[in-house]
Image (cartoon, rainbow, N blue to C red):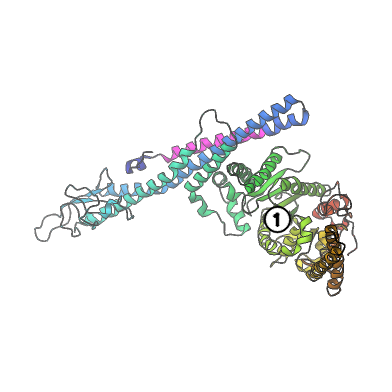
Amino acid sequence: MTSVLTWQQLRDLKLSELDDAADGWAKVSYHADAAAERVDAEMAGSLAKTQESESAKAAIRRLNRLSSNYHYIRTECGLIRTSVNGLSTELAAPQRRLKEALDDATALSYTVHEDGSIGYPADGKNDLTGEKIPGGTVVGNNGTLTSGNKGLYTPDDKGLYTPDDKGLYTPGSDPGTTGLISPNPHRAKAQDIADRVAHALREAREIDERYRPALSKLKAGQGLTVDAKTWTDAAADAQAVRSAADYLTDDIPLDKSPVSRKEWWDHLTQEQREEYLAAYPNVIGNLDGIPAMARDEANRENLQLLIGKLSGQHDEGSKTMLDGLKSIDYQLRHQDPGSPPMYLLGVGDEGNGRAIVSYGNPDASKNVSAYVPGLGTALDADFAKNDLKRAQDTAIDAQNFDPSSASIVWLGYDAPQMPASEFVHNADVVSMDDAKAGATTYNQFMAGISATNEHSDPHITAIGHSYGSLTVGQAAQQHGGIPGADDIILVGSPGTGADHAEDLNVGKDHVFVGAAANDPVTMLPNHRTAGGMLIGSGLGAVAGTVLGHESGSYLGDLVGGAAGAAVGGVVGHKVGDSAADPDKIWFGTNPASKEFGAHRFFVNDGPRPFIDGQGPTPAHSNYFNPEKDLASATNIGKIVAGESGRIKMERWR
């Protein structure tokens, strides 16, 4: 379009041609997506399974580049389609109003001038002379208080409407008149038509100006190499399209329940869904209540855009998050055909990063679990390696008992950034605030899982590990409990903030606890006991240092202080513990205790801290791993599959 859209151009614009162009770009996007899938599955995937030579590896690298190229084409063509379709959609209303105004002008035999002003004929009767009241020309007021609105100004002696010292336009003061409102009966009708033309043209020009920069960005030179910089540019392209097509956001039910969002999505046409997926993958992909297939499609798109965005940032946090995103991307592209398929249900760079991955389709599966990780978890390479595998192992174990099972890892909150090994010695600096904040978001997600599941009565299991068990516990204690949850599993738990299992709103017989004998996180002292240990340790250290100093050496100071701290801590523990409830740990009643009232299932004791040479908390990370704790992983799988009656039990602490 020209730099200044005219009413003639708006009138003659064939929006159907824009729609056809949008459909054409959509077809290119579909073909590129299908080609990428064929390259990944039928070519690179097959080659990787059957060939291990250097030439095969080189071929796989080239195929991966080809797949990336197709994916980039899909993304950019989808953005072009959304922009062109959005432009057509938004221009339809002002064009319709313009044509209605022009039809009215034709019906009244008015003249529409090149500049949009309206000429009207002589009519009426001058009471003094008996002659017809002269006709005239009026200029439309487009509703803005800007110099470009000719309707605000009186005409000069040449009939031109330009801002000058003559002041604001007075309705009815046509060229040659005295400034009084014309008594010609056509005058008011002509002014109304002129105003409608001006309004329609102003709106169309604003739309045109909004889309022009977005469309100008969506182009690439020949010989383009799709690399990190390319995806950085693509992220900027997506933002430009979102800024232009902001009308789409008006109807997204961000403030509605997951059930209402599901209903909204179900009533969209396929074309509308594709527009939202192309322009707002970051919103649709993370919107609870949207079906898993659509979220996965949106998030795979958003994953590439996030990788591009973070590739252009050089702070340590972005680099760390980028490592996690790239690992997830690799796993999505190289899935084990013998493993449940992956679905990316959420991804984002807010806070310490967000990622929600399901193994198995949570909408189609009868049994669905959602595991919340704990201490030190963030969107990084460790999360992509370890926490995703825990969800994968759980899905595989559950499917051994019921093939219609899916397992999710949910990193939708900011966990305390402290590894379990440090938490054991610094529990006093960790509060419940992160868990409470995460609980609300987790419940929203779980409501979405229930809303989109295709079964009338799915079996839903909430799983919390480490600090994640506190998050799950807090979610369960909110009004109504965790939406849809039938069972709750707590492993490696420092407490839930609840006194009894029945406080978790699923019934105490549906709360299951795994606590390894050598997992110190499950045996953290309560606040009163810890206070005694801290005071005793401090006083013992002082006394030991003084006695050690008497030996006359620095080593004596050091050894004496350490020994005194240890002895003092033990004494302090005894003093504090004697006045405290033995069933209480750091965040409430010990979930593995009889007082709490949950079912404690059997897990292996696990490696001993330090003694077995694996660090301070090796047993804390083994609950889901069938290679390191088959008993625990099998029990978790049975519960998730709805077979809790078959688990092996263990005595309470």
Q: Quadrant of residue 88?
A: top left
In the image, 273: left or right of 373? left
In the image, 212: left or right of 267? left
* Residue found 13% across the figure and 58% down from its top: 126
Q: Residues within 10 Å of mark 1 (few under 14, many from 20)?
A: some
Residue holding disc 1: 417
Dominant secondary structure of the magenta stretch?
helix
Q: Quadrant of residue 571?
A: bottom right
- Res 172 seen here: yes
The spot of residue 93 in percent (x, y) is: 41, 49
- Res 74 seen here: no
Q: Amino acid at mark 1?
A: Gln
The spot of residue 84 in percent (x, y) is: 47, 41
Q: Quadrant of residue 540?
A: bottom right
The image shows residue 572, relative to residue 207, as above or below, that is below
* Residue found 39% across the figure and 48% down from its top: 206
